[in-house]
């Protein structure tokens, strides 16, 4: 009887872990949207948002480890001969109601993860464009303050670029 209680507790814990993962992904998407706004509007909050995203990604990593551990624990609680190494393999062995809830959560998590990935890719592209703009501006500014190769103070004759040096004309 204790094994069945542990099994049920693990299934409930798995469901709660998936709910937490879903909520963290929602927060990650929200912060990623704010990050895009900060990139576009050149706001100072960009670094703070990046740090928040890193913290959320760390949480997602921990939740993913917890999920894997719980799937293993639940798999061990199944009848001998039932091999369920993944969450998808585990669903047919759960009660229909639990299975449906978990499946909906997994679908939601997959959708949010895809949306997050797309937003991050777009933000990465925007950041690269902004970086190219900065590099172009630096190149322009550096070029505008560099003296010309033939620069001489006013009143001096410009140096000839291809002169041989002795005033001798060379013909081929």
Image (cartoon, rainbow, N blue to C red):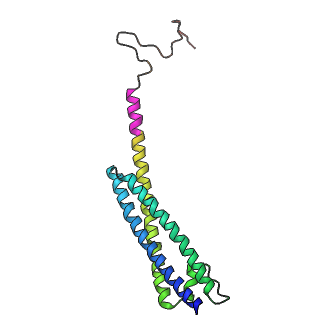
Q: Residue at left 41%, top 59%?
A: 52
Left or right of 166: which side holds 145? left
- Location of residue 137 in the rendering, given as x and y in whole percent from the top left corner: 38, 38
Q: Residue at left 52%, top 66%?
A: 61
**Residue 64, placed above or below residue 38:** below
- Location of residue 98 in the rendering, given as x and y in whole percent from the top left corner: 48, 87
Is residue 57 found inside the magenta-colored segment of the image? Answer: no
Residue 6 placement: quadrant: bottom right
The N terminus: image quadrant: bottom right
- Location of residue 70 in the rendering, given as x and y in whole percent from the top left corner: 56, 78
The C terminus: image quadrant: top right
Residue 116 placement: quadrant: bottom left
Q: Residue at left 38%, top 9%?
A: 156
Viewer-proximal residue among 168 and 126: 126
Residue extending furthest bottom?
1
Viewer-proximal residue among 112 and 62: 62
Viewer-proximal residue among 75 and 148: 75
- Location of residue 17 in the rendering, given as x and y in whole percent from the top left corner: 48, 76
**Residue 71, placed above or below residue 151:** below
Count of numbered tags: 0
Left or right of 39: which side holds 97? right
User: Do we see residue 128 in this rendering?
Assistant: yes
Q: What secondary structure characterizes most of the magenta part?
A: helix
Residue extending furthest right?
81
Q: Residue at left 50%, top 71%?
A: 63
Span shown in magenta: 136-145
User: Do we see residue 86 in this rendering?
Assistant: no
Residue 115 placement: quadrant: bottom left
Residue extending furthest front?
2
């Amino acid at each position: 009887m204790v094994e069945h209680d542990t099994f049920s507790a693990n299934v409930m814990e798995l469901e709660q872990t998936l709910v937490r993962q879903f909520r963290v992904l929602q927060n990650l998407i929200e912060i990623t949207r704010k990050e895009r706004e900060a990139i576009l509007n050149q706001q100072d909050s960009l670094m703070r948002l990046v740090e928040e995203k890193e913290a959320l990604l760390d949480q997602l990593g921990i939740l993913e480890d917890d999920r894997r551990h719980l799937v293993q624990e639940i798999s061990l609680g199944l009848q001998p001969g039932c091999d369920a190494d993944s969450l998808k393999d585990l669903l047919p062995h759960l009660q229909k109601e639990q299975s449906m809830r978990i499946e909906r959560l997994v679908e939601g998590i997959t959708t949010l993860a895809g949306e997050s990935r797309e937003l991050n890719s777009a933000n990465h592209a925007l950041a690269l464009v902004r970086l190219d703009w900065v590099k172009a501006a630096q190149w322009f500014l550096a070029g505008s303050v560099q003296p010309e190769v033939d620069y001489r103070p006013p009143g001096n004759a410009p140096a000839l670029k291809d002169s041989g040096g002795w005033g001798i004309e060379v013909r081929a």
